[in-house]
């Protein structure tokens, strides 16, 4: 019996032989990631149990991105702890201030995560890197502490589910729409502790940015990882960024899957996920009359330059609806610079949007876009749980950048076709 991409990567990173789903194995890590919320817990555990040395400081990555720029005294102290630790242990991959961006956009951009890698991160959306053909998964802070001590992690080998997207994409449809459609079909627990292996002609047509969006939200179906085979586009993306060798894996023709599902993209129009779960996805044509108070364009899901280009293309020459706040957060400094060079920042400002620094901010209800009681936001973020972006009596709707930008113009959830010239 052949192996899936996930099984090949796990096998290459363990001394165990003949692995199969359900086995508990110890894997050697290529990258262990944490941020300003989860790193302090890991640091305290590390310092309580270690002799004071990281197993391999080159494999540790810290990104201060959730409550930064520091929103209050507590977050300032959290970040100071990480800064002090990174300095003491000479962690070279430490990103703060003007060097920092939203972690899951920053690491691929910096070439720190690569095809064939075994990656853990103390953040659930670490699964983003599966879009590069890596095995990447979120863990708890204590698991991260153990990785800091050993450069290893324990893992149960997951089953894999294959999803094949066939046909041509409809106008304005991107990776966010495809993954919301998938989650809408299988539910938020439909991939529980499985690998979602995503492929098909429609996926091949997507750029790396849209693939990163899809893998990013694998966790919203409960998945352990969301993997897309590395192809020519992937290699072209990583070749100019990679700081070390990498290996491209693909599933064997006789690999075993728990299930195989095909989707026809002719049936997938731009999607909107209604409160309070990502599985509540429906076509934008069926959204009805939903007035909104805020639009957020950004996050680790849709804050890359390709997302900003889509949004700016719709907002150019338009005005944000009166009484609506449109917040645009480029995901990294490089994205911000590119957006400025292309005139996108000017377009956003002229439309009446608010431009913020690279930060997770409003996505987790942290800062820079908190909702009041009764307010509704449409966001290109990845979660819309109760209270996710502010008051428990607020509501969050999810979409891609095209629907978000169009809705910022109309003041209600709208199709891009309603405003695009």
Image (spheres, rainbow, N blue to C red):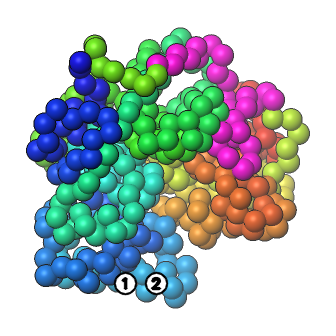
In the displayed structure image, the side of residue 192 where residue 188 appears, left or right: right
Disc 1, disc 2: CB below 8 Å?
A: yes
Q: Residue at x 19, y 69 (%)?
A: 149
The image quadrant that residue 225 belongs to is top left
Image-quadrant location for residue 353 = bottom right
Whole-percent x, y for residue 251 in the image: 28, 22
Judging by the rendered image, the residue that carries numbered circle 1 is 80
- The crowd level at tag 1 (other Cα within 10 Å; few <14, some 14-19, many 20+) is some
Give how far across and how far down residue 200 sits, in percent: 43, 17
Q: Quadrant for the C terminus, please.
A: top right
Q: Which residue is mark 2?
A: 76
**Element type at mark 2:** helix
Quick check: 141 above or below 223?
A: below
The residue that appears at 55% across and 57% down in the rendered structure is 329
Q: Residue at x 68, y 47 (%)?
A: 277
Write the residue at 42% across / 81% down: 78
Along the line of sight, which residue is nearer the eye, 185 or 80? 185
Q: Which residues are magenta?
A: 260-286
């Amino acid at each position: 019996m052949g192996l899936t991409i996930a099984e090949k990567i796990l096998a290459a990173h363990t001394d165990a032989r003949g692995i199969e789903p359900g086995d508990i194995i110890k894997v050697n890590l290529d990258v262990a990631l944490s941020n300003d919320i989860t790193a302090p817990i890991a640091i305290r555990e590390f310092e309580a149990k270690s002799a004071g040395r990281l197993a391999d400081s080159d494999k540790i990555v810290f990104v201060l991105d959730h409550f930064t720029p520091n929103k209050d005294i507590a977050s300032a102290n959290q970040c100071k702890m990480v800064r002090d630790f990174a300095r003491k242990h000479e962690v070279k991959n430490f990103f703060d201030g003007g060097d920092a961006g939203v972690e899951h956009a920053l690491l691929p951009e910096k070439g720190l995560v690569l095809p064939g890698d075994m990656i853990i991160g103390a953040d659930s959306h670490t699964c983003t890197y599966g879009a590069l053909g890596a095995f990447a998964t979120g863990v708890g802070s204590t698991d991260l502490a153990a990785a800091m001590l050993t450069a290893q992690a324990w893992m149960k080998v997951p089953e894999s589910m294959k999803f094949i997207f066939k046909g041509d994409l409809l106008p304005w449809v991107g990776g966010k729409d495809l993954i919301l459609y998938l989650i809408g079909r299988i539910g938020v627990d439909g991939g529980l502790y499985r690998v979602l292996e995503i492929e098909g002609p429609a996926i091949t047509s997507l750029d790396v940015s849209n693939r990163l969006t899809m893998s990013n939200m694998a966790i919203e179906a409960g998945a352990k990882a969301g993997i897309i085979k590395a192809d020519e586009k992937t290699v072209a993306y990583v070749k100019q960024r990679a700081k070390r060798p990498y290996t491209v894996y693909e599933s064997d023709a006789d690999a075993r899957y728990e299930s195989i599902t095909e989707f026809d993209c002719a049936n997938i129009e731009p999607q909107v996920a209604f409160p309070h779960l990502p599985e509540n996805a429906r076509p934008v044509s069926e959204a009805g009359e939903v007035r909104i108070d805020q639009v957020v364009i950004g996050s680790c899901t849709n804050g890359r330059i390709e997302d900003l280009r889509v949004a700016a293309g719709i907002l150019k020459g338009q005005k944000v609806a009166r009484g609506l706040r449109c917040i645009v957060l480029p995901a990294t400094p490089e994205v911000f610079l590119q957006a400025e060079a292309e005139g996108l920042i000017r377009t956003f400002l002229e439309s009446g949007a608010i431009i913020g620094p690279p930060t997770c901010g409003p996505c987790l209800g942290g800062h820079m876009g908190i909702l009041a009681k009764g307010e509704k936001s449409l966001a290109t973020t990845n979660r819309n749980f109760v209270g996710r972006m502010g008051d428990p009596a607020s509501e969050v709707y999810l979409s891609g950048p095209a629907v978000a930008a169009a809705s910022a113009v109309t003041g209600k959830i709208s199709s891009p076709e309603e405003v695009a010239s």
